[in-house]
Structures are given as structure tokens and as C-alpha cells.
Image (tube, coloured by chain):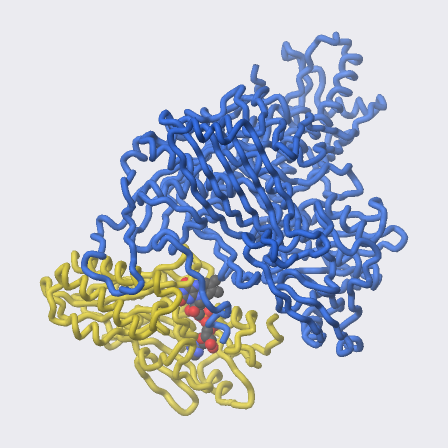
Chain colours: A yellow, B blue
Amino acid sequence: MIPSIEILIPKNLNEVLGILSNQDKNFKIIAGGTDVVTGLKQESNRFINTEVLVDINRIAEVKGIEKRNGKISIGAASTFTEIYTNPIVSSELPILKKAVATIGSLQIRNRATIAGNFVNNAPCADTVTALLVYNATIEIESTNSKREISLQEFLQGPYKTQLKKDEIVTRINIPVPPKTFVGDFYKLGRRQAVAISRITFAVLMELNGNKINEIKIAAGAVTPIGTRFPELEKYAAGKEANNDFIKSLASKLGEEIIKLTGLRWSSEYKLPVVQQMFYQMLKRITKK
Amino acid sequence: MKKEFSVVGKPIIREDGFDKITGRAKFADDYKFDGMLHAVMLRIPETHAKINSINYSEVENDQAVNSIITFADIPGAKKVGMIKNDQPIFCDEVIVTPGDVLAMLVGEDVARLRLALSKIKVKYTPLQTLTDPRKSLEPDAILIHPELGSNLIIHHPLRKGNIEKGFAESDHILEQTYTTQLIEHAYIEPEAVIAIPLGQNGIKIIGSIQNPFSARRIIAAVVNLPLDKVQVIQAQLGGSFGGKDDTMCILSARAAVAAIKVNRPVKIRYTREESILESYKRHPYILNYKVGFKNNGKIKAMKIDILADGGAYCSMSPFVTWRSVVQATGPYEIENVHTDVRAVYTNNPYTGAMRGFGSPQPIFANESLMDEIALQLGIDPVEVRKINGLKAGSITATGQKLQNHDVNLLTVLDTAAKETDFQNKWKKYKKDKSIIQKYDFTKPVFNDSQFIEPDQLIKKGIGLAASYRGCSLGAEGIDAAACYLSIQNDGSVYLLSGLAENGQGLRTTFSIIVAEELGITTDNIFYLETDTSRVPDSGPTVASRATLMGGGAVKNAAEILRGRLEELIRAEWKLKNSDEIIFHDNKILTTDNRQLTTYKDLCKLATNRGVNLATIGWYKSPNVDWNEHTGQGDAYFTYVYGCQVAEVSVNLGTGEVYLDKITAVHDPGTVINKLGAEGQIYGGVTQGAGYGILEEATTENGLIRELNFDQYLILTAKDIGEIKPIFVEGKEIYGPWGAKSLGEPTLELTAAAISNAVSNALGKRFFSLPLNLEEVLLGKKLRPVEVKRGSLQ
Ligand SMILES: Cc1cc2nc3c(=O)[nH]c(=O)nc-3n(C[C@H](O)[C@H](O)[C@H](O)COP(=O)(O)OP(=O)(O)OC[C@H]3O[C@@H](n4cnc5c(N)ncnc54)[C@H](O)[C@@H]3O)c2cc1C
């Protein structure tokens, strides 16, 4: 049962910050509510003590998608439908667009927001891998501070982030990737819609002929949270993207995941699939 | 000669369609009454436990609690059941499965009631549990219901011919074991019911109830009232699929006990979690098949041993498994058959009726086996089925001779094969050995040879499954149905059947039958609210019997009234008895197309002449017979035939099965509502496909892990490709214009067809449903160790 909870609907960012700075009560930001409401209903420990919900859907500062100074700035409360249908995202951030398209169903995408996804930080949050390979940074504000840090840094562990009680994520900033970069996103669920990811990964790379200049690799759901693989990226930089090397890279991803996660009940299935499908993706990207 | 129909067989939009899509339709939970209270259930987090004491002292003076309802408040039967009275309304001494309810709290506010529940102190001693049905009949097994002396719910033997001789005469013998999983009905509307006390007049129930007459019987027994003092009204039903029978009878009885005690209306409304926890499921089966066959493909002998997990209560297990024993060989004529089907008690969630009702499990087994025979002999799946398939005059496993209807097995098989170019595709996709890798978990990191070249990743496959299915109840019990029909003096019509709408479109189908008979359109017909006080008991809406039996009664009623109108016409227009009168397009015509009058004017005339334009129609099935010791007899009075072809793509890297196309060829007899019939196929195939590749309720010591739809997954529209319905309308002497059954046949074949298609794609056979990711890739199921979800921490 959802306990009765007060809801505040502030009209601008200052009001939100003012509300959050009051530490007497347990406030919780609500954007799309697709994690908050289900969490409350399931009496999840992360939500159960909430006394006041702060609805941020009317805050202009956390909405809108624009390109400025070589960066794409996405309002934290942009819904996945807004992101999916945005022309800047379509032309500059195809990996994010693809990730967004796999989320839930149309109804969920119409409500759920991008910041909600990574602030909740489930292992299976689908946009995280895409944002990580794009080197996304996030802007965080409170009444007495404003900071911008990398998403990687922000995410601390399953359902844990750096967010403090008086803070709100306002924007996600992504440096526009040079046109020479190509990549892809992969998600495996148990069905084709409204599916929790069993495996996700994203790749963004620059090829010079057949040589890998630079590669960024992130995976989720097979790791405790969405994670980049710096060792792997270093290993691959400067290598020929031939069949043998791609195979070795895919095997190495398997090794790295075992290092991070250990062997679990699901590894018996997930490990062969991750390596196989990662190989398939690299073949697809390098063939282009 | 085939009659030209004006309404029958046309696509007619359901009469409740607009109300449902606009939200106007009233479901049980939409009803509210002055002074209405709510009831919540007391359970303990155990699977099998002895209740030592229940201490209510902390809630007795709680303002939120109007009343505590326990075992002691039940005026009548303390235990009930569809067949055996083994299921308590409230458990006072022991619980035998996690869904069991000890007592109820009744009050105005559900949230406060739930809080009060946590203050009740239950002292109990956990007992040893029995969750493996294979151990239920072992001599040292604990007894789930000690008073019954055994965990055996039922044993159906079937003996035909001489099994030893059959095997001796066979050139090949094949033996395999198959397993099928526990699944949930997953109706979109969870259980809800309201009981309204009527003082001297008994009790009125409004609920999401599949079978109002079954509910009435159980409520009457529990509250100790005669049947006429228990009025059951069916609200719009948000899905049932066989699932809103026992559970709803028991919930209705609990609400009735409470309403009578507090003398106010009482509502019970389940959350999804409670619904999945307490409601019954589809039986998991373990099926052992041994088959002997000749070099030419002819099957000589089949020995079948089936064990069904009935869970904690008997419910419909004896009937579910009876259908299995009748149909277990599949639609094939086999001289020597030796079948044993047993259902046993365990501490698992109880299992009962679900669309298909004991057929999807054996079909998965016997249709897998047919393909194996074909492969072993180097013939194709169509051929092996043709060699053995039932034809007119064939003798079934139960010794019944098939006659008096088109035995259309080979027709549906041929139609399906031609439509899909089955044989060519099957040969093209066929693999001689398994192409799925073996993974060694001790070496989880891939070596180079394990990577699959991209153009080899996806493999296509095609597979089919065929069945015959006995229509209606067969030898399960008395099989008759009633219908009330009343024409008003302006020609408008009231119609009410004793069978209940389950969301399948029965009201529309019945309206079509009346419209056809009276030469009017369905918008002239008003279908009345289903109410046990208004129409005779017609048995349950189960076994795909509504169109056949209920439709038969509707047609009978319409014929009676039409007969009276014809009599009046003959007198009025001085026609001879032999002159045919045509009711068409709201007009009354002679065969030479002379209009005598309009339908409306005729109704007015009839009223003025004192003709009785109201009647009860009746339809009773012909006799069937059954010998329970030998499993021989005319099990059902007629059968339907179906064949489905699945075309799939399988991902060798992930084990995903993509459902490209399902072609469903069915002989339901005459199609009454084309739109409704196609709808049955789309729905049944989708459910059957979910059974094939995805759905499963897993348990941890009897407790279901997947208590909501975030974890219990059913297919979405995106998971299924094209579904192509094809009807072969065979001739039939029973039912309205020869209309028979369709609802369940559409579901029972799909999983088996898909499994055969996946085997065709991979060169590897599967023995355990569902063919989920792990089953396809690793050949086994993987289970989480922890029941608790990460997101809850
Ligand atoms: C049916 C269903 C299907 C789903 N399918 C998917 C799926 O396929 N893939 C997937 O990744 N997820 C899925 N989800 C989960 C969920 O939709 C996503 O995580 C979504 O992005 C959450 O966004 P929201 O706006 O709804 O978050 P909310 O529920 O509003 O908030 C989630 C958390 O983020 C915090 N928060 C939100 N905005 C901010 C902000 N600007 N600053 C600081 N904190 C903030 C909230 O306080 C809360 O702790 C699904 C959920 C449902 C119910």
C-alpha cells in the first residue's frame, strides 16, 4: 500500500532548492514517478520513509534539449519520448536514441525521465551505458552549491549515487561526438517490450581504416551498475580491428565482467551471451 | 444443403465493446454501496504449518476493525471444493500452502485494516513440506490431508488392446520424458466480490465470477441457506481463462459470511500479489511416453505415464487429468494403448481449471514424439501424422468410434501444410545434428572457435502440432443448458443464457443466433444481466461448451418462439402447414418472396392475439459413457480438430525464439461470429505461445517468486508476429447449425508447434517447457538463489 504522502508542485528551480534545503522532513524528488511510485507500492526501503514528494515536472530549468558550446545539454526531467523525438539527439546521439527506444513501453517512455533513470541507478538502467560512452557529465544544484561531475563519478553502487538530500540534478551535458565516431547499443531482455534488461552494452569508437583509434565500452545488468571498461579500452586502442582481435576483445570483456561481478546464478547464461553478442556488435560496427 | 445465413458467420462487433473501451463497463470493484465495508486476509509467511494460537487482543478494540471473521463464524460447510470438499474457507488448525487464509478483518479503511493485520499474533509450528510431486506417493511421504489417508487425488487408467504385443510387433521403440511448468492465468482484473445481506431474503453477491451457479452452490453450503436465498450476479469480467472459479467461489463465501455477521455489504478486492499467491494455476505435468512403431511409420503401441501436481487442494484435478487420459495419445489411431494419469497433493499452490484444461501438457509431449518418429524414419512430420491420424470411423484410445461428424484431422493438417509450404521449408531448415554449442561453465571465457559468424547467428525453423479435442464436459458430468428469451410487442428482445460471459463474447454469439432465427439484427436484442435468480442453472462456462451447449439452448428458445409466430401466420394468412415461411431482414416472406408483414407488426399482432412470446430454451447433450477402470467408452459426443504451424527464428547467441508467424487452422464446426472466432485464435495463440517460450511461475518451497507482472512475464504485442486464422467448417449434427468449440483448441497447440519449430531450426529437441532463453541456449532452467529483489533493499 502507498502511504498517504504530501506532494509539492514548485514552479521554478529556486523554489525546489528552497524546499530541499529544509532538512526537517524526508523529501523525495518525483519526475516521471515510474520508479518512485512502484517503489512506494512495493514498500522498498529506499522510498518507504518519504514524507513529501517534490514534483519537478513544471520546472523549465530541468526541461528542454539544446546544443551549446559543442555540447548537447539535456534537461534532467526530459522524458524518453522527448529525447527519442528530438532532432539533435537523432543526428548526434544515435546510441542514446537507440537505448531510449528500448525502455519499457510507449506509456512508460512518455513519463519516465533520463535523470530518474540514473539517479535510481538500477543495474539494469538502460540509458546509463549509452551516457557513459558519450562521457556525459551532470549538473547538480542545491541552494548553496552548483557542481558538474562525470556521470561515472556520480554513480556509486547499485541504487547508490553521490546525490545529497538537498540536491537536484538539473542537466546532463554530452560533448558532441566527432562525426568520425561510430557505435551501437545492445539490450537483451526476456521479451521485446516492457522488459528488464538482462544484458546491456554500448560501444563508441573511432576507426582509422581498420585501426581502432579510440574505443569506449560500457556494460550494464551484467555488472553491479553500468560501468566503463578502461583496461579494455586501453588494450584496444591502436589495434587492427580484424576478426581475431575482435574475438579477443570480446573474450576479454567476459574476463573483466567476471572480475567485477564474480560468478552468479545467472552468469552461466549471461557470460556466453555477452561475449557472443559483443562480438556480433563489433563485427557490425567495424564492417561499416 | 448449406443454408444461406444473414447474420451467422459474419464479423459482428461485440455488444460490450464500446462500454469496455470507453471505461463505462462496470466491473465488480466499481460497485459501491452505502455502509459497505472491506475485508482483508490474515496469512502467515509459511508453506505448511500447524496453527497453535491466534491472539487478536491488540486489534479487538481497534477503531479500524469492525469485526474479526474466523472459522467459528461459518454457519455451514467449513470446507468446500468443486469435486472434493478439502479446501477450508478459513484455516483454523493448519495451513498447507502459502496462499491459505486464517481469518479476515472487516472495516472501512483497507490501509488501516492492513496495519491491524500486523498486530495479530499467530503462534504456529512450521511442518515439513512436500513440494516434489514425484515424492508424494512414496510410503514415507508426509500427508497433506492426513484425514484422506493418501496424497493421491485421482488415478485414471486406460487400457486398450495388448501393450506387450504392440511393442513386440514394433520395429522401433522410443521413450522420452517431458515436463511442463506451473503457470498463472494472468487475467487483467484481479479478484473482486461484494456480498450484500438481504435479511430474511438471504444474500446477494456481485462479483468477478466465472460461474455464478457454482458460486451459488458453494456460498449456499457455507452460509447454510437454500439456493433460492443466494442470488449471484456476475459483474463484467476482466478475464478469467478458467481462473475465476474455485477462488471466486471461496472469496464470495468469505464475503457472505462476513456480510451476514456484520449485516452490512462487504467487499473483498485482491491486489495482484494476493491474486497470484492464492489463486489456482495450471498443473505442471511430468509425462513419460514410450512408443513402438513400424518401419512404415505406423504406431503399434503407446505407453503413457503422467503425473500432475495438484498442489494443496483437489479442485478440478480429477477432471483436468481425465481430459488428459482421453486425449493423451494425440489424434492418432493406435491399437494398443496403456495410460496412467495421476494427480497428487503437494504443498505447492493448488492447480485447477485453465483454458486448455489438461490438454496443452500431453500435446507438447505427444506432438514432440510424433516429430521424433518422423526424424527417426526419415519421413516428414505431415506424413507421419497422416499415416496414424484419425479418420471417419477410426477408433480412439478410449475405444470410441468417430462418426456423425466430419473427422477433419487430415483436412486441417493438409490445409495448414499447404498454406505454409510446410514440407519444403521443413526439409530446408532441418539440421542433422544439434547446432547449439555446448558451454563448459568451468571455462566461461570464450575461445576463438566459440564465436559465431554473424550470418550464422539466426536460424529459421518450422514446426506443427495437431490435436483432436472432445467438446464440452463429456463424461465429467451432466451436460445441459438453458436460455430465457422474451420478445416484446414492439419486436425488441430480452435474452439471457444460463451460461456466463467470460469475456469471450458469448453474449454477442447468442444474440447472433437469435437474430438469425428471427430474421432481425443483433441490435434488436438486449442481453440481460447474468443473475442466478433469473434463469435455470446451466452448469459452468467451461470446456469450450458455451457456443455448443448454450448456443443450442438459445437456438431452441428462438425456434420455439418462431414456431409460435409461424403458427399465428399460418392461421392469419391461411397458409398450409407445408408452406415455408421466411424470416428475413425484419420481414416475413413466403418462398416466392411475397411479403406477408413485417417482423414488428407480427409481434404486435401476436401480443394482441395472446400468443406467449417468452420461453425457456433447453439443450441437453446426447449420452456419453465411461468405464473408469478400463478408461474405455464414448468419452465425448463430438470432437473438433486443429493444426497449428509455427515459423520461428532462433538466435544461436542468446537462445531467443522470435515468433515470425503462426498459422492456426481449426475446425470449430460452423462459425457463428467471424470476428469473435478470429479473436479466439489471436488470444489463444498468444497465450499458447507464452506457455511455449516464456511464462512460468517458479516456487521456492511452495512460495511463488513472481507475484506481480514485473516478474511474471507474459508476451506483449511486440513478441508475436503474424497470426493467421483459417477455419475449416466441418459438418456436425449437434450445436446451433453445427457450431462446436474453439476457445481451448486455439491455445493447446501453439507451444508444441513452436517447440517443434525450434527443434527444426537447431537440430536439437526440447523436453521441458517453456523454451526460455536458458532452456534454448543451455538446455536447462536457471533459478535465482534469492527470492528477494535487489530494488527492495
Ligand atoms: C513498467 C515499467 C517498465 C520500465 N522499463 C524500463 C526499461 O526498460 N529500462 C529502464 O532503464 N528502466 C525501466 N523502468 C524504470 C524507470 O522507468 C526508469 O528508471 C525511469 O528512467 C525513471 O524515471 P522517472 O522520471 O520515472 O523517475 P522517478 O520515479 O520520478 O524517480 C526515480 C528516482 O530518481 C530521483 N530523481 C528523479 N529526477 C531527479 C532529478 N532531476 N534530480 C535528482 N533526483 C531525481 C527520484 O527522487 C527517485 O529517487 C521501467 C519502469 C516501469 C514501471
Q: Is residue B461 left or right of residue B663?
A: left
**Residue at x-position 50% and y-position 34%:** B329
In the image as oriented, which residue stretches furthest toward the bottom? A144
The quadrant of the picture occupied by the N terminus of chain A is bottom right
What is the quadrant of the C terminus of chain A in the image?
bottom left
The one of B779 and B247 positioned closer to us in this rendering: B779
Q: Is B32 placed left or right of B640 in the picture?
A: right
Give residue B404's quadrant in the image.
top right
Q: On the image, which quarter does residue B79 sit in?
A: bottom right
Count all numbered tags in the image, as a single digit: 0
Q: Position of residue B718 (x, y in %)?
A: 41, 50
- Residue A225, percent across and down? 36, 74
Q: Residue furthest left?
A: A209
In the image, B425 versus B782, the foreground residue is B782
In the displayed orientation, state which residue is furthest to the right.
B200
Q: Position of residue B449 (x, y in %)?
A: 19, 56
Q: Position of residue B747 (x, y in %)?
A: 51, 41
Displayed-image quarter of ligand 1: bottom left
Residue A9 visible (yes or no): no
- Closer-to-camera residue (B176/B414): B176
Q: Is residue A232 left or right of residue A82?
A: left
Visible residue check, residue B132: yes
Relative height, residue B98 to residue B188 (above, below): below
Give the residue drawn at x 41%, y 25%.
B387
